[in-house]
Amino acid sequence: MSTSRRDWLFALVIITICIGLYFVDLAGIPTAPSGLHARGRVIAVDNSNVRTNLIVKTESQFLTVRLLNGPHQGQELTITNMLTGKMEFDEFYEAGATVLVEYDMAKGKPANGLARGHYRLRLQLVLIGLFGLLLIGVAGVTGLKALLSFVFTAMVLWKVFFPLLLKGFAPLPTGMAVVGIFTAVVTFSVGGMNRRGIATFAGSMMGVSLTCLLAVLFTQAFALHGAVRPFAETLLYSGYYDLQLTDIFIAGVFIASSGAVMDLAMDIAAAMDEIKQKNPDIGFRDHLRSGLRVGRAVIGTMTTTLLLAYSSSHITMFLLFMAKGLPSENILNAPFVAAEILNILVGSFGLVTVAPFTALVAGLLYHWKPSMNKERL
């Protein structure tokens, strides 16, 4: 079977799995009761009960909403928008806004409506579509496979990993298994079912395994627990008292870095594959040194990528600390800041080591048998 046929067959298998995962419910948690949903246009607003304290709004905002789609399109209902004073959760509406409305029926008419936020679902679909078109337009068939890998990874996390954690599965082995699954799919679908794909997968898993080990050691040394993550305490209060939050935090560390690790591993494996194709007679040591030189060039930017990705998601936290004039010792020693430092540095350990890991595996694969140097798998 040719390489292209194997790749397309592999892609077909992944598509089938994604479709199957859509209908899977491993958690078995009943869906929270809800009514009908529709887009609604706010046509009138009553803010007479709203209390404003500086920039914080509390109490009730009354909205008159006209439904824009669904079986009751064109009908109007009144919605009470409760403002709790938590700006990260509250939304304040003005006339003309389009919102997602959840409502029940009373006496044949829409009633008991709730505003579930500004309507964003259509724009989200547009953004996903544009992302897919960009991937395919730039990378062609490889972009299509990358898009498929993206969808598969999201499905595995949402339909497999998260439900298994809620059911009480051990986070660390479950996380490693899940990372192994989507690393295999991503590397083999994008890199191909060949030595390049095998080298990428092996190097990635070695880097992720090291990250996991270091995360375990330094989480204990830093005396951190999983409750430093947002919503962790709320999750416990929701009835999941037995969740291993610290292990979930550790799993989050190596899962978060696995994408960058795969990226770097693919760069090294692809470079070594190209070197071998252009110079079939290159020796093992020269081949390995070439791969390491490519790795050195990429490592510097990739470690900075982790720093920017993690720190930029906490800009307001750092601004608050700076505005309060807190000394750097207090900031760096705070548990939630220490957790991010652990994220960045431990993830960077995996990035730095994945380059030699991948180069070594690729070198061994391309030079294991002299007869294999003349043909690709």
Image (cartoon, rainbow, N blue to C red):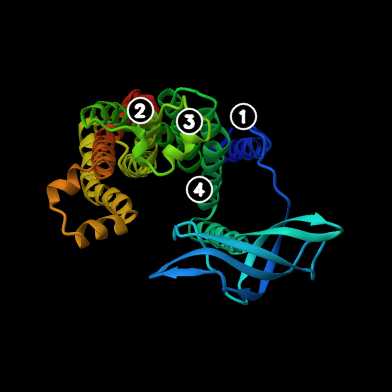
Regarding residue 144, the answer to whether it shows in the image is: yes
Image coordinates of residue 244 in percent, x first then y, are 41, 26
User: What residue is disc 2 on?
Assistant: 365
Decide which of tag 1 and tag 4 comes sooner along the chain. Answer: 1
* Tag 4 secondary structure: helix
Question: The N terminus lies in which quarter of the figure?
Answer: top right
Amino acid type of disc 1?
Leu
**The label number, if any, that marks residue 170 in the structure image:** none
Decide which of tag 4 and tag 2 comes sooner along the chain. Answer: 4
Image coordinates of residue 108 in percent, x first then y, are 87, 59
- Image height of 40 relative to 290, above or below: below
Between the C-alphas of marks 2 and 3, the distance is: 25 Å
**The label number, if any, that marks residue 146 in the structure image:** 4
Q: Are marks 4 and 3 in contact (CB under 8 Å)?
A: no
Between the C-alphas of marks 1 and 4, the distance is: 26 Å
* Tag 2 secondary structure: helix
Query: Could you tell me which residue is drawn at 73 percent across and 51 percent down?
Result: 35
Q: With 325 as the anchor, is 266 left or right in this view?
A: right
Q: With 74 as the anchor, is 343 left or right in this view?
A: left
Q: With 112 as the anchor, is 245 left or right in this view?
A: left
Query: Could you tell me which residue is drawn at 86 percent across and 57 percent down?
Result: 107
* Tag 1 secondary structure: loop
Between the C-alphas of marks 4 and 3, the distance is: 18 Å
User: What residue is disc 3 on?
Assistant: 178
Q: Are marks 1 and 3 in contact (CB under 8 Å)?
A: no
User: What residue is disc 1 on?
Assistant: 26
